């Protein structure tokens, strides 16, 4: 997370509230989505790796 706040939603886990400086690691094969929860747009650095 670079700016703002988001809610990270995943198929098998409870939603997680995230803010600047937070990071998450999960299996990208699982359903996932994010929702901005801050008044301003959230900025996310998103990296995906396929093995």
Image (spheres, helix red, strand yellow):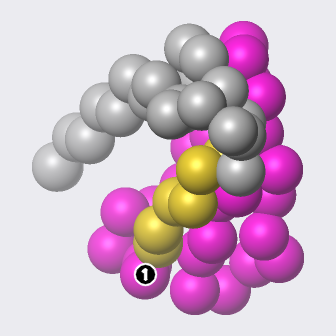
In this orientation, which residue lies closer to the viewer: 51 or 24? 24
Considering every residue shown, the one lying at the far left of the view is 50
Front residue (pair 37, 15): 37
Quarter where residue 13 is shown: bottom right
Looking at the image, which is closer to me, 4 or 12? 4
In this rendering, is residue 30 above or below 39?
below
Q: Image point 31% across, 31% down: which residue?
A: 47
Which span is picked out in magenta? 7-31
Q: Is residue 17 left or right of residue 43?
A: right
Location of residue 38 in the rendering, given as x and y in whole percent from the top left corner: 71, 40
Q: Quadrant of residue 46?
A: top left
Q: Is residue 3 left or right of residue 46?
A: right
Q: Is residue 18 above or below residue 17?
A: above
Quadrant occupied by the N terminus: top right
Q: Mark 1 falls on what kind of element?
A: loop
**Residue 44, above or below 27:** above
Q: Position of residue 29 (x, y in %)?
A: 33, 74
Q: Residue at x 78, y 70 (%)?
A: 15
x%, y% of residue 27?
46, 62
Residue topped by disc 1:
31
């Amino acid at each position: 997370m670079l700016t703002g706040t988001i809610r990270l939603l995943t198929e098998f886990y409870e939603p997680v509230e995230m803010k600047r400086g937070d990071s998450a690691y999960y299996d990208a094969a699982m359903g996932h989505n994010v929702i901005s929860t801050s008044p301003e747009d959230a900025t996310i650095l998103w990296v995906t790796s396929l093995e």
